Amino acid sequence: MEPVIILHHHEIVLKGGNRKHFEQVLLRNLREVAAADGTRCSLSGGYGKFVLSPLSGGVEEPLIDRLRKVFGLANVCPGVRVPQELESISAAAVDSLSGQEFRTIRVETRRVDRRFPMKSMDVSAAVGAVLCGKFGVRANLSKPDVTVSIEIVDGVAYVYSRRLRAAGGLPSGVSGRLVGLLSAGFDSPVACWRMMKRGCNVAMVHFHSMPYTARRSVDQVRDIARVLTTYQYRTKLFIVPFAPLQNEIVLATDPSLRIILYRRMMMRIAEKIAHMVNAEGLVTGEAVGQVASQTLRNIRIIDSAATLPVLRPLSGTDKEEIIATARTIGTHDISSEPYDDCCSFLAPRKPETWADAGPVTGAEEKLDIPSMVGAAVASMEMEKFVFPGSPGADRGAGTGGRGVHAPSEHA
Ligand code: ATP
Ligand code: MG
C-alpha cells in the first residue's frame, strides 16, 4: 500500500487540441508546489488526472492544502496505490475509513483497465460487503455518510475516501498575460485572482502618493502580491510614484474631474507596462455603481484612455461577494488594515459621477500627457515575487520556510 494523491483535472479535459499543452503547464505548476513543500515526489498520469507519489514518507496535510489551490485541478484525493487484487483493494478501503465516524457508505468503482476481470459494479458490491461487515454499517447509494472510490487503471488500483474540492479554473500561465491595477483595497486583489483562475499571469502595477501617503500602504500591496504569487508562482510588481503627476493635475484642472483624470493616467501608464511585459490587456477591480468613479459613464471615459481591453471581472458583483472571496484567497486581512489610497490624497469634495468627454479632453489639453507618462515610467521600480520552490526562489528567508511568501527582490 503506497500513499499517493490523485489529482483530477478540471476544465482542461474539455480543451481538445490544447489538452497536451495544458497538461504540461499544470504538471510544471504541480512540481513547483510540491518542491516548495520540500516534498520529493514523482508525478505521473495524464488524460484527466495526475498521480503524485511521495518518494519518501507519507502525504502531509500542508501539501494537500497547497495542491487544493492549484488552478486546473477539480479534486485532490489523498489515498493509496495497491495491486489489482480484490483483497488488497478491500484492505485499502477498510484502512481508508478507519478512525472515521459514519453509519452509511457507498463504494464507487471506475475500471479503465479492462484487463482486470471483475466489472466495476461487482467490485463495488464486493468491497461494500467487506466494509459493511467490518464496520457494522449499511450501504446507501444516494446519500451516504462516506464514499470510498476505487480507480482501476494502468495495472494498479487507487483507493481513497477523501475527495477534496480544488480551485478549478485553468492552469496558471495557459491564457497569456495581463496587467492588473492593484491597490491595497479589497477589490483589485480579488479581480486579479479571478483572472489568474482563468489561466492568466497577472503582472501588477501600484500607484502611490508617497511622501504624502504612508510607506505602509505600499508594503500592504507587496504583501498582497506575495499572497497572489501563491496562485501564479511568479509575479512582477511595478511600483509607480504618482504624486508628481497628481500635483500637475491639481494645479491645472477642475477639482471635480481629478479622480477621472488620475484614473485615465493610470490606464495610460498601465498600458505602457503592458507593452513592456507582452500583456494582452488590463484588469481593474471596479464594480458598477460601487463608488462615484464607478458609474457606467465614468468607466466608459476611463476606459477610453486605454487602447488595450480593460477586463473588470468584478463589474457585476456585490461587495459581500468580493469580501467573501478575499477571505478565501487570503488577501482579506491585509486589505482590511487601514491604508492611504493615492486617490483620497487630493480628492475633490464633489467628484464627477457622470463625466462628459468634452470637459475631460479639455482638461487634458492643459497637461503634457506624454511627458507625464514618460516621467512616471522612468521613475517606477519593478519587484519580482517568486513562489518558494520555483527556480530562482530564495527559499526560507524571512518567511519561516513553508509559508506563503518569497522575499521580493529589486530588479
Ligand atoms: P480597490 O478595492 O481595488 O481599491 P475601489 O473599490 O477602492 O477598488 P477605486 O478606488 O474606484 O475602487 O479604484 C478602481 C480600480 O482602480 C481599483 O480596483 C484598481 O484596479 C485601480 N486602482 C485604484 N487605485 C489604485 C492604485 N493606487 N494603484 C493601482 N491601481 C489602483
Ligand atoms: Mg481602493
Image (cartoon, rainbow, N blue to C red):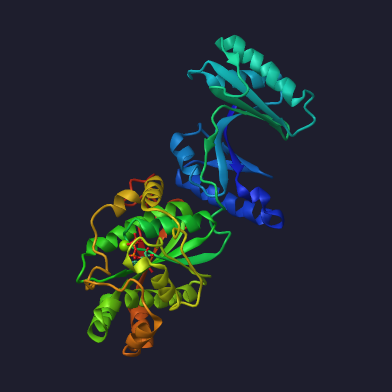
370 relative to 54 in the view: left or right: left
Q: How many numbered marks appear?
A: 0
156 relative to 301 in the view: left or right: right
62 relative to 80 in the view: left or right: left
- Among the 4 quarters of the image, the one containing residue 176: bottom right
Question: Which of 191 and 300 lies nearest the eye of the viewer?
Answer: 300
Which quarter of the rendered picture does the N terminus lie within? Answer: top right
In percent of the image, x 72 and y 35: which residue is there? Answer: 154
Which quarter of the rendered picture does the C terminus lie within? Answer: bottom left
In percent of the image, x 37 and y 62: which residue is there? Answer: 289
Where is residue 60 drawn, in percent x and y? 46, 34
Taking the image as drawn, is residue 344 in sight? yes
Question: Which of 384 and 141 lies nearest the eye of the viewer?
Answer: 141
Question: Which of 195 and 411 lies nearest the eye of the viewer?
Answer: 195
In percent of the image, x 61 and y 24: which residue is there? Answer: 142
Taking the image as drawn, is residue 387 in sight? no
In this rendering, the answer to whether 377 lies above or below 46 is below
Where is residue 337 drawn, in percent x and y? 25, 53
In percent of the image, x 66 and y 13: which residue is there? Answer: 129
In this rendering, the answer to whether 199 lies above or below 64 is below
Question: Which of 255 and 168 lies nearest the eye of the viewer?
Answer: 255
Q: Quick check: which quadrant has ligand 2?
A: bottom left
Where is residue 182 drawn, in percent x and y? 37, 63
Where is residue 19 drawn, in percent x and y? 67, 53
- Among the 4 quarters of the image, the one containing residue 82: top right
